[in-house]
Amino acid sequence: MQRIKQVAAHLAGSRPGQGLAELERKRPDDVVITMAVRSPLCKAKKGGFKDVKTDELFLEMYKQAIVASRIDPAIIEDICVGTVLTPTPVYPARTAAMAAGIPETVPVQVVNRFCSSGLMAVADIANKVRSGQIEIGLAIGIESMSDNPDDGGPPQSELVSCNSHSRDCNEKMGWTSENVAAEFNVTRDEQDQFAAESWQRAERAQELGYFRNEIVPFTVYQKDPKTGEKRFVTVREDDGIRKGTTKEALSKIRSAFPQWGNGTTTGGNACQLTDGAAAVLIMTRRKAEQLGLRIVAKYITTAVTGLPPRIMGIGPVPAIRAALKNCGLTIADVDLFEINEAFASQAVYSVKELNIPRDKVNVNGGAIAFGHPLGCTGARQIATGLNELHRRKQRVLVTSMCIGTGMGAAGVFIGETPAN
């Protein structure tokens, strides 16, 4: 009966109309985050992780999560890993966990909802904590796009491809970007302006050290280009951020997809292919206090929505609306938004359609500047957003992304004490 009352209290706390004051109330059974960290983000095939095998990337993320968590990994009751391109991902997810020192008694599962997979891993663990199934769990988002390039969707049966929406799911992402730009009148100029701001904000944040509290150093193998000899190096910073990027320079880049729409998408105003990982430790407030851990944030809710695959990029619009409705908040209540920049076309539209002030969105840059490791992004946004939320001493964070095949996802978090 006590468990039923606890669950009922959680559900009551998430119903529409509650508002910010109610969400800020602290209860022992609140779902809280005590750690949100990420790896450096490195250019696929070219950057710091180009020689790192998938299971090695998993291994290093687990190792760094154990250190940053400040807990005995034996007390973790479940691990959920979000990844997209990793072949048979449960193998590296499980084997690397044990190799990192996590006991075999700690189970592991894998989720894949394309670009939201990191957020889905967080939501999975959070919902297990909220329901009382577990009291403490670890969510990981990870992707090696060097080791596992994106080859698109598999061939479709004629029985499936006869449906136009199904057929659209296998089209190139660039096609969807051009569809959004054409259908919603997002100009090349707007896209280049948005992209330039992303590059410039990321450059400034890196120079000022804003990412230091969220990035954990990764010690990995790199091959000597001349001898092929492998040696360990420690990577500490994102390596995809181009310094001195301007709108004028971006405007000179040729269209990446001139065969579609108005050809407004370029290599300068779309996300980079990137390797990276992020980890989020989730538990009840009661457990965090018992362990003497500082609480970084309170998890509130996650929403996922569907839409036509041909304009999948506008997914953040319905997803953010749904997530805010779930917890009775408005756009004005939110201090910071982390909206994934798969393409400037969809990011520009999403910000305009939701009427979000630009100075609240991706304030330290986004995927255009430092990359989008597919399964990592949903967890990475939480680490980045909470770090900046605490630096600014603000309260409410919303993260969101579009999802291939026509979906969108969003999460809501309330910041608490300063990040570790």
Image (tube, helix red, strand yellow):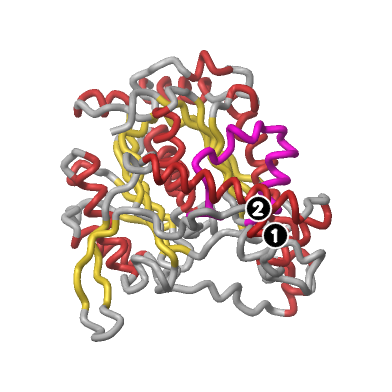
Mark 1: give few (<14), some (14-19) or many (20+) Cα within 10 Å.
some
Task: Tell me if residue 294 can be seen.
Answer: yes
Magenta-highlighted residues: 343-370
Residue 397 is one of the magenta-drawn residues: no
- Local SS, label 2: helix
Q: Amino acid at mark 2?
A: Lys
* CB contact under 8 Å: marks 2 and 1: yes
Residue on which the image places disc 2: 247
Give whichever of 383, 190 is nearer the camera.
Answer: 190
Prevailing secondary structure class for the magenta stretch in the rendered image? helix
Question: Is 411 on the left-hand or right-hand side of 42?
Answer: right
Residue 414 in the image: above or below residue 243: above
Q: Quadrant of residue 172?
A: bottom right
Residue that appears at 67% across and 77% down: 156
Residue 155 in the image: above or below residue 179: below
Residue 355 is one of the magenta-drawn residues: yes
**Residue that extends furthest to the bottom in the rendered view of this protein:** 227
Residue on which the image places disc 1: 251
Image coordinates for residue 49, horizontal then vertical, percent: 34, 67
Q: Amino acid at mark 1?
A: Ser
Residue that appears at 72% across and 51% down: 307
Give whichever of 40, 255 is nearer the camera.
Answer: 255
Image coordinates for residue 381, horizontal then vertical, percent: 47, 44
Alpha carbons under labels 2 and 1: distance apart:
6 Å
Task: Tell me if residue 142 can be seen.
Answer: no
